[in-house]
């Protein structure tokens, strides 16, 4: 029996999404369920109750990560489905919660149909994916993958000085188990896209084959600070002029790197920043992303060249300083293939895509075979109370998850 | 007797400039003689002593403006020479002091040569030209010209809460006389250029025919605040891109308005100003200057058109908001002619120019015929301890002042 006709209960999934969204509900229809707050505790408690009702065995690790396990016929490596229940301060109902509750819906569907799998199946709720209350983001999947040290993370404080360690204890979710080392043969995460691509193309879901490489830079241009009146234009060393020329040229160049290239100037600063003084120094922050690190490097090289040329042309010191780099993630081919196969099984049109944002799966991909599934975000909006994904799309994402898991877990 | 061979004593002028510069001298060779401080009082006292020694009659008005008068054969309208003795916090030896001490040197030269003039001659030291301790600048010439109300000005406080009124009394320079209403047939001010033009052209002095019109604007561009990752470039409404294009195009257009056009972007702001978020809104401050208000308007119109086009091209809201305007000043033709004639008399090469910065003469021109004389600033540097004008150039400026005054005052 291939179970290719098996489908999740979209109505139940939606009902649970809405019930979870009541915890920390905001007046404007969003959610404020910051990690390790009382709201987060209530969200965790509700999830734990649902897992208990579904017959799952719950374990909590020292980072408060929750692992709900459905036994397999073997005790071999499990298939994992994970995301997060914490939210941004003015977040939406779907970011994170969809991935956890779609996973629960997969379990319920298997339970309802009496399907036993060879491999065990686990749902994970990762602590503090958002990083909104305690920076950085994705910190507990990071500890799991060995990126961060747990004692350092315990000491991270919020604005009021409360630490992650204290707050884990306070809400009763500081578990006993070591963080890391679980035996996973495949990991899947359903998440909202947080961008407009799927909606634009009218697709119910996307097969996420990787995460973009990201690099952060500062473009720094230094000239001469002079009075706005007396100095003629051709005698100035005006860093604003060089910066404007450089940015204009870089933006015009970016389409040459294809549809997945991203170039963002998030902040601008002029010093001393006085209206009637030519600034001595201007700075623009830059965020470059592309699924292929080589292309990120090409964009960096072009930007560096354009900035240097603009500096030379306008007789100012212009340079690019690297601030931070996060390499591109290529998800596991076999996991990606399982998601594609699931789309065929379900008769769903999808596209291969890369994630522009970070997710727990970025870190988990370092220690286990991983892939992701995206569902459309209305107007591409996320980290916003107006965030919305249609019931049919949430259901489609859960069905892809179901069949990707079935493909890996083995069953009758 | 035409006295065309009369020349000031450049050595005496330089010696006094250096002696005045000892009051408030900084380690780096500059001057900190902020208005209405003890240093300002000591500078005023020294000036008053020199005036007394030169046989001048001193009057102080209620703003602390100092008027030192040399009698004429008639009691008709006086010829005035004025500038200021206060400095920036890290100012130089020449900004302001040169104008007052060149005026004193003119008087000394007339005294030495035994020249009587028909009209009386007055030297003025204006209180708080700089506006560095108490904003705004040029406040006492402004009260004199009826631009500001004296009671409002008395109430202006520095960072420590001390007011102009209190400090005038404390240093003993709150005079009895009403501010304004003196009878001047012509006014002249020698000042350092504070720009590089005269030095570039190798000229010892400039005939200042007016002051540039100045207008301040904000360029405001509003788009959509989105995450730096998921949203494709062609789906963004990125205000930084439109601003960069607009500024690049405006800078390229400015040379079309001639050598006196000035376009300065002093400050830049991106909101929310987060490295991995496309800003929802960016603002650039703009300062436009030109001697002809019509040209200022032309530049404004071109800027407004370019900004609107960039906004349209990149699908963002882009607009220009006017913040402040100061019309161009055209100095009195007859006073300007007297300076030109003085240059001929002295055999000095000069050029006609406009001031890019404000001076007390801007306000005085509203109530009396006025012109200015500029001398070169080394490297165009001012409001800086490195400010420097060569002895020969200071002397040239004083000689122009001498002969412009003689031209107006009438003499044997």
Image (cartoon, coloured by chain):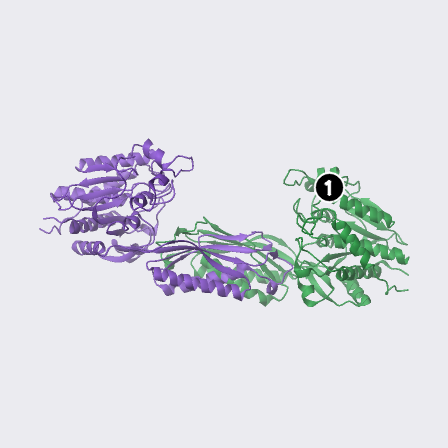
Chain colours: A green, B purple
Badge 1: chain ID: A
Q: Residues within 10 Å of mark 1 (few under 14, many from 20)?
A: some
Instruction: Please state which of residues A106 and A363 is positioned toward the viewer in this rendering.
Output: A106
Query: Who's the residue at 58% across and 67% down the image?
Result: A256
| Element type at mark 1 | helix
Left or right of A104 in this view: B376:
left
Residue at the disc numbered 1: A38
Left or right of B375 in this view: A79:
right
Left or right of A222 in this view: A25:
right
Residue A354 location (% of width, % of height): 69, 61
Q: How many marks?
A: 1
Where on the picture, by quarter, is residue B60? top left
Left or right of A305 in this view: B128:
left
Instruction: Please state which of residues A41 and A138 is positioned toward the viewer in this rendering.
Output: A41
Where on the picture, by quarter, is residue A402? bottom right
Where on the picture, by quarter, is residue A333? bottom right
Q: Is residue B259 visible?
A: yes
Q: Is residue A118 visible?
A: no
Give the vertical position of B242 relative to A52 (above or below): below
Residue A149 location (% of width, % of height): 70, 43
Residue A54 location (% of width, % of height): 86, 50
Residue B23 location (% of width, % of height): 30, 36
Instruction: Please state which of residues A272 and A224 is positioned toward the viewer in this rendering.
Output: A272
Give the vertical position of A157 relative to A305 (above or below): above
């Amino acid at each position: 029996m291939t179970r290719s006709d098996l489908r999740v209960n979209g109505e139940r999934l939606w009902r649970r999404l809405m019930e979870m969204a009541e915890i920390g509900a905001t007046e404007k229809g969003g959610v404020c369920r910051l990690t390790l707050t009382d709201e987060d505790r209530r969200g965790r408690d509700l999830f734990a109750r649902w897992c208990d009702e579904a017959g799952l065995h719950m374990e909590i690790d020292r980072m408060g990560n929750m692992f709900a396990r459905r036994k397999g016929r073997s005790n071999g490596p499990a298939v994992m489905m994970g995301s997060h229940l914490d939210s941004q301060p003015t977040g939406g109902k779907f970011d994170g919660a969809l991935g956890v509750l779609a996973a629960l819906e997969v379990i319920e569907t298997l339970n309802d149909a009496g399907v036993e799998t060879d491999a065990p199946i686990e749902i994970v709720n990762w602590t503090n994916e958002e990083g909104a209350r305690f920076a950085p983001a994705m910190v507990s999947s990071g500890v799991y993958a060995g990126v961060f040290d747990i004692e350092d993370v315990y000491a991270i404080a919020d604005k009021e000085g409360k630490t992650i360690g204290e707050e884990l204890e306070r809400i009763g979710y500081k578990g006993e188990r070591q963080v890391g080392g679980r035996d996973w043969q495949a990991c899947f995460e359903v998440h909202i896209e947080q961008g407009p691509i799927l909606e634009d193309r009218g697709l119910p879901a996307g097969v996420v084959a990787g995460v973009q490489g990201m690099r952060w830079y500062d473009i720094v241009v230094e000239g001469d600070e002079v009075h706005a009146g007396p100095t003629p234009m051709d005698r100035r060393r005006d860093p604003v002029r060089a910066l404007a020329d450089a940015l204009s040229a870089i933006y015009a160049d970016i389409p040459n790197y294809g549809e997945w290239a991203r170039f963002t100037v998030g902040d601008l600063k002029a010093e001393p920043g006085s209206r009637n003084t030519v600034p001595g120094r201007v700075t623009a922050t830059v965020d470059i992303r592309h699924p292929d690190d080589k292309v990120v490097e090409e964009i960096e090289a072009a930007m560096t060249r354009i900035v240097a040329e603009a500096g030379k042309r306008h007789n100012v010191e212009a340079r690019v300083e690297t601030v931070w780099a996060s390499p591109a993630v290529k998800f596991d081919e076999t996991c990606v293939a399982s998601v594609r196969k699931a789309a065929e099984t379900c008769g769903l049109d999808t596209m291969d895509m890369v994630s522009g944002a970070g997710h727990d799966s970025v870190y988990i991909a370092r220690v286990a075979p991983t892939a992701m599934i995206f569902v459309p975000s209305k107007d591409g909006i996320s980290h916003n109370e107006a965030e919305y994904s249609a019931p049919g799309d949430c259901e489609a994402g859960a069905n892809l998850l179901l069949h990707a898991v079935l493909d890996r877990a083995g069953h009758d």
